[in-house]
Amino acid sequence: MSRPTIAGVARAAGVSVASVSRVLNGLAATEEMVERVQRAVQELGYVPDSRARSLKVGRTYQLTLAVADVGNPVYVTMMRAVEEVVSAAGYRLVVTTTGPDVVDEVALVRGMARGYADGLVISPLRVDDDLIKSIRECDVPVVVAGNVPASAGVDTIRANSPKGMLLAVEHLLAKGRRRIAFVNGPVDTVPGTARAKGFADAMKANGLSPVAEVEAVDFTFAAGREAGVELFAGLDSAGEPSGKTGVTGEASGTTGVAREASGRAGVAEQLDAVIAANDLLAVGIMHELAARDLAVPGDVAVIGMDDSELAEQSFPPLTSVNLGSAERGRRAAELLLARIEDDTRTPRRIVVQPTLSVRKSTP
């Protein structure tokens, strides 16, 4: 049996080949024409020949989304939003991971010259001059979901992390929490830099100084637990007793259990809230609090950032700053499609404003 063709679809639908092409490419068409073409496509089992179409129109009808870590829930949310927009326009989305190294980000952008995609949305974890240069010189349109200088001259969509930090700090203050620590990811990253500055500005604006600040090695759950160990060890060493388990205080006559309980009380006296730079770090912190028998939010309130699915799934559910990952994904996809259609457009810089999703991890 021969493979159905676009001409066969046109005959079955009673329209021209050009009309079928318009419908299949998502161009303007009447509702009646769309219905007739779609019905004929389904009846015949027609599948467009993407290779032939690419050669004819000079497009692959593929777009790429590049993120640092496809396992991070915030990128999953962004990916779904991008895919929804581009698929409606007749494109297939290819998702790839750059990792944390800017060298790999640059290599990916330069690799777009191979012609396997018509455009790129990239969410870089780190940005340097080489990356900006490669984006400027890229053979296909590029949209940056992140913060790059205006002088880069590219379409960008980014979150307002500083305002998000202000929302988090003011929420804690409204709940009577003033002894606040901050757990950030690497400060040499785009989000790490923005969130560190946002936290410092928010604390200063409210006349506060942080109890402690810890820089995690990554924006992951495991890094959050390690950062929790570092945070609480610092608080332990700042007061007496140390709170180490299994240590007996022979000189004072206290038992290891008593010292441990006293240590927990000491931490709670020094610290009543933690803000983490993303939800994965925040959940890692909550696990470390539970390991020390400290209650959330009874002893220590916790706030994350990103408001990912993980925030609702954690126990207790995590209060988190929503940085609009879905909105950023949708707007980035729209910018890319517009750039593909008209490469002479003036570059746009869009900022998505945050909101706070309050859950059980804050009182």
Image: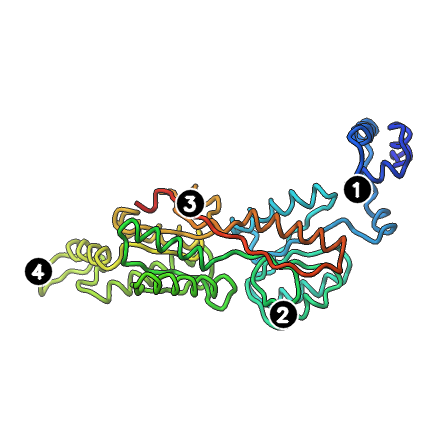
Mark 1–mark 4 Cα distance, whole angstroms, equals 81 Å
Mark 2–mark 3 Cα distance, whole angstroms, equals 34 Å
- Residue neighbourhood size for the residue with mark 1, other residues' Cα within 10 Å, grouped as few (<14), some (14–19), many (≥20): some
Circle 4 — which element?
Answer: loop
Identify whether 50 is placed above or below 125: above
Q: Which residue is mark 3?
A: 357
Locate residue 15 relative to residue 100 in the image: left or right.
right
Q: Nearer the viewer, mark 1 or mark 4?
A: 1
Q: Nearer the viewer, mark 2 or mark 4?
A: 2
Q: Earlier in the sequence, mark 2 or mark 3?
A: 2
Q: Earlier in the sequence, mark 2 or mark 1?
A: 1
Which mark, residue 25?
A: 1
**Where, by quadrant of the figure, is residue 99 drawn?**
bottom right
**Where, by quadrant of the figure, is residue 68 drawn?**
bottom right
Question: Which image quarter is the C terminus in?
Answer: top left
Q: Where residue 323 sits in the image (x, y, percent)?
A: 49, 51
Q: Residue at x 8, y 60 (%)?
A: 253
Q: Residue at x 69, y 46 (%)?
A: 86
Q: Which residue is mark 4?
A: 253
The amino acid type found where label 2 is placed reads: Ser
The amino acid type found where label 3 is placed reads: Ser
Q: Where residue 292 sits in the image (x, y, percent)?
A: 27, 52
Mark 4–mark 3 Cα distance, whole angstroms, equals 47 Å
Circle 2 — which element?
Answer: helix
Q: Which residue is mark 2?
A: 151
The amino acid type found where label 4 is placed reads: Gly
Q: Residue at x 87, y 33 (%)?
A: 4
